[in-house]
Image (cartoon, grey):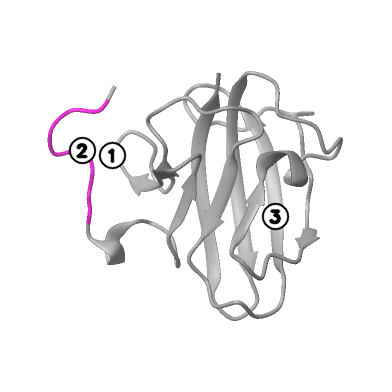
Amino acid sequence: MLAAGDVILSRTERGNDFALSLGGHDALLTREYAGLASISAKIPGDASVTVDLPAEGSISVQLLSCDGSGHLRSGGINAAQIAISAPSGRFSLAEAAPSHEALAPGHYVLRVMHQKHGEARVFFAVK
């Protein structure tokens, strides 16, 4: 899946305005998914999401269903603009889902937005 040289480790080249990890795996920019950071490991549907943001205000989360190439599926999950108070910088994928249940196996894009600090987008697969 990832070859040597595909992962860019510089924080300024993560493709996001702030660092984000899912299930303990850092989201990193790769050549494989243009404009999206990604997680190479498959993660559980209720994995913890950690964002590197100051503990101020709330974040908005958008969860989108997509194919294995990162292209959005029409009619997929779209939990647009769910406001989550995450003063610890942590929440679970289940909190971002409309049903508040663990995500089903498949591919997704998670978009996390903060009014002052920008946004982070990551492509990932749920096992």
Looking at the picture, tell me which residue is in the foreground, 42 or 108.
42
Residue 113 belongs to magenta span = no
**Disc 3 element:** strand
Residues at marks 3 and 1, CA–CA distance in whole angstroms: 24 Å
Amino acid on which disc 3 is placed: Val
> Residue 8: horizontal and vertical position, in percent?
22, 50
Label 2 close to label 1 by CB (< 8 Å): yes
Residue segment shown in magenta? 2-9
Residue shown at 50%/38% (left/top)? 123
Residue 4 belongs to magenta span = yes
Residue shown at 40%/28% (left/top)? 41
Nearest to N terminus: mark 3 or mark 1: 1
- Disc 1 marks which residue? 31
Quadrant position of residue 17: bottom left
> Residue 54: horizontal and vertical position, in percent?
54, 78
Residues at marks 2 and 3, CA–CA distance in whole angstroms: 27 Å
Residues at marks 2 and 1, CA–CA distance in whole angstroms: 6 Å
> Residue 45: horizontal and vertical position, in percent?
64, 29
